[in-house]
Image (spheres, grey):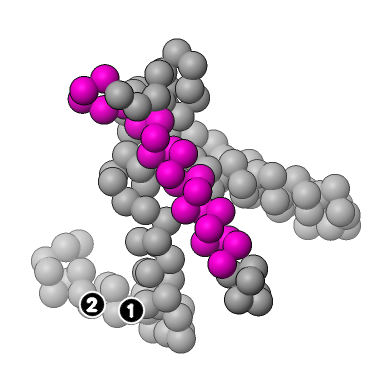
Amino acid sequence: MSPAQDTLSQDTLQRLAAVVESRRPAADGSGGNPQTSYVARLLSQGPDAFLKKIGEEATEVVLAAKDAQHGGNSAAQQQKIVAEMADLWFHCLVALAHYQLQPADVLAELVRREGLGGLDEKALRKAQERAQGQP
């Protein structure tokens, strides 16, 4: 990915996260209206609503990828994967907003993991969890 593409992707995520955040209902009545905003409706319904959507969208990504795997991986099938992945990422942004997190938090974690082998990183996390007394 070129530096320009990297900036574009970060900027896009930041702009979309800002829109999602603006739809988050606030205690003072500001924020999005659940009757006119899909995001506000999801957030007002609580975690079960957007977590269910994340599960549904993740399943749709898997199904689209399986269709591409078995159907020759055409341009239309690749576009279906992209569209479903966009839906999944969008709903993940809603979850981040609910938990008062930003895409930058996820990107920072990916940067932290950069250069670590996946198996090494997983072993390190397991060791840290055991040290903290987590199962």
Q: CA distance from mark 1 to mark 2?
A: 6 Å
Please tell me how many numbered marks the rendered image carries.
Answer: 2
Name the amino acid, label 1: Ala
Residue 43: image location, x then y, percent: 36, 29
Residue 83: image location, x then y, percent: 69, 45
Farthest residue toward the top? 35
The answer to whether residue 114 is above or below residue 20 is below
Which quadrant does the C terminus fall into? bottom left
Name the amino acid, label 2: Ala
Residue 32: image location, x then y, percent: 39, 24
Which quadrant does the N terminus fall into? bottom right
Residue 2: quarter of image: bottom right
Which residue is pictured at 40% across the width and 30% down the height? Answer: 23
Helix, strand or loop for disc 1: helix
Residue sitting nearer the eye, 7 or 40: 7
**Is 23 left, or right, of 130 in this rendering?**
right
Q: Is residue 73 visible?
A: yes
**Is 4 left, or right, of 100 in this rendering?**
right
Q: Is residue 70 visible?
A: no
Q: Residues within 10 Å of mark 2 (few under 14, many from 20)?
A: few
Which residue is pictured at 26% across the width and 20% down the height? Answer: 29
According to the picture, the residue beneath numbered tag 1 turns out to be 123
Q: Give, as a single range, the part of the protein colored magenta.
A: 7-29
Which residue is pictured at 45% across the width and 80% down the height? Answer: 114
According to the picture, the residue beneath numbered tag 2 turns out to be 127
Residue sitting nearer the eye, 115 or 66: 115
**Is 80 left, or right, of 20 in this rendering?**
right
Helix, strand or loop for disc 2: helix
The answer to whether residue 118 is above or below residue 57 is below
Are discs 1 and 2 less than 8 Å apart at CB?
yes
